[in-house]
Image: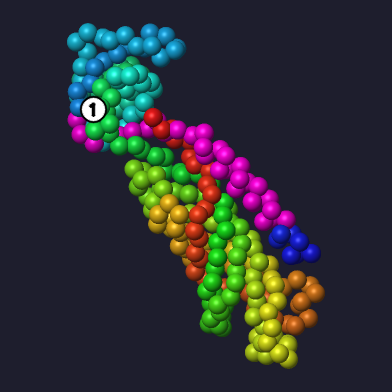
């Protein structure tokens, strides 16, 4: 019965993985940061359709490291407004924010592309995928095992560097899967060595090194079903520590929008 629950959960997680991949295709990025100061033209928004009229003699220089959001673009310009810019010098702040409201500016598109970097949110979305844990150490006995352990995992992704979209991302993960358990005279009540299937539950932390390669550490427990518990496997419901490898997670990206 436990094994049936495991298989059901794997099917459910597979459904969410496909849903996440569909969702990620519809997302665009809008947050950026200046990597060098540039001259900007001030603009007023004339209506809710994001039509702009240029303000005369309203110019300002951006600051390196300033965060802002792109709100509109046309063939020649990119229109932006800053997050609530704070500065000890009130006159300096008035260049970017007036009465608590961000001012609008525009920058020529070619200059914009040369002087800005995309900024992604710290939270990078959920992730669903298959993780293999080929190496396990049974806690309390230092028994080292190499066996087949494959399961579906659900995780949350957090970026170390907000300028990198899909590298150096930490992923706390929970997982459920199936393990191939080697039984022998030393670890169970069997006369000959054999393998049996167990349900495996795990918690882990993975590091997204590149877009499709992930390495992580896991801990968990394995449990034989009731029909197999007569062999008296000594590691039933006891902890293990393992190394996990994943290639090609499907993910649901955070709702940062591309220009």
Tell me if residue 26 is in the magenta stretch. Answer: yes
> Which element carries disc 1, helix, strand or loop?
helix
Q: Position of 222 compared to 142: left or right?
A: right
Residue 75: image x %, image y %?
33, 19
Query: Please, is residue 247 above or below residue 67 in the view?
Result: below
Q: What residue appears at the point 73 percent right and 87 percent down from the top-left corner?
A: 189
Residue positioned 50% across, 54% down in the render: 248
- In the image, taking residue 161 as reference, residue 254 lies left or right, namely right
Q: Is residue 175 above or below residue 75?
A: below
For the C terminus, the quadrant is: top left
Q: Please rate how many residues cluster around mark 1, counting C-alpha atoms within 10 Å: few if below 14, some from 14 to 19, many from 20.
A: few
Q: Position of residue 211 (x, y in %)?
A: 43, 51
Q: Is residue 6 left or right of residue 247?
A: right
**Residue 128 at x, y = what percent?**
57, 51
How many marks are shown on the rendered structure?
A: 1
Q: Nearer the viewer, residue 191 or 142?
A: 191
Nearer to me, 63 or 34: 34
Residue drawn 54% across the image and 72% down it: 134
Seen as rendered, the residue at the extreme front is 75
Is residue 169 in view from this perspective? no
Residue 73 lies in quadrant: top left
Q: Is residue 30 a member of the stretch shown in magenta?
A: yes
Q: Which residues are magenta?
A: 8-37
Where is residue 242? Give x, y as percent: 52, 71
- Asked if 246 appears above or below 186 in the picture, the reply is above
Residue at x 64%, y 61% (from the top left corner): 176
* Residue identifier under label 1: 111
């Amino acid at each position: 019965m436990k094994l049936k629950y495991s298989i059901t959960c794997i099917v459910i997680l597979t459904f969410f993985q496909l849903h996440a991949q569909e969702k990620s295709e519809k997302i665009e990025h809008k947050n950026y940061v200046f990597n060098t100061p540039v001259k900007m033209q001030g603009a007023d928004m004339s209506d809710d359709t994001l039509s702009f009229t240029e303000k005369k003699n309203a110019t300002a220089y951006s600051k390196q490291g300033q965060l802002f959001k792109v709100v509109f673009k046309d063939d020649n310009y990119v229109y932006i407004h800053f997050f609530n810019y704070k500065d000890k010098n009130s006159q300096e702040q008035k260049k970017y924010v007036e009465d608590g409201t961000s001012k609008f500016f525009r920058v020529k598109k070619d200059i914009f592309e040369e002087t800005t970097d995309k900024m992604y949110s710290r939270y990078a979305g959920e992730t669903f995928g298959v993780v293999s844990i080929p190496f396990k150490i049974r806690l309390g006995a230092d028994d080292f095992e190499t066996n087949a352990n494959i399961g579906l995992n659900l995780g949350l992704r957090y970026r170390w560097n907000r300028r990198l979209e899909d590298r150096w991302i930490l992923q706390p993960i929970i997982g459920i899967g199936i393990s191939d358990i080697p039984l022998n005279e030393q670890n169970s009540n069997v006369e000959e060595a054999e393998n049996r299937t167990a349900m495996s539950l795990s918690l882990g932390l993975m590091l997204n090194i590149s877009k499709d390669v992930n390495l992580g550490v896991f801990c968990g427990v394995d449990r034989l079903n009731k029909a197999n518990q007569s062999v008296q496997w000594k590691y039933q419901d006891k902890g293990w520590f393992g190394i996990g490898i994943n290639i090609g997670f499907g993910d649901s990206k955070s709702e940062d929008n591309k220009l």
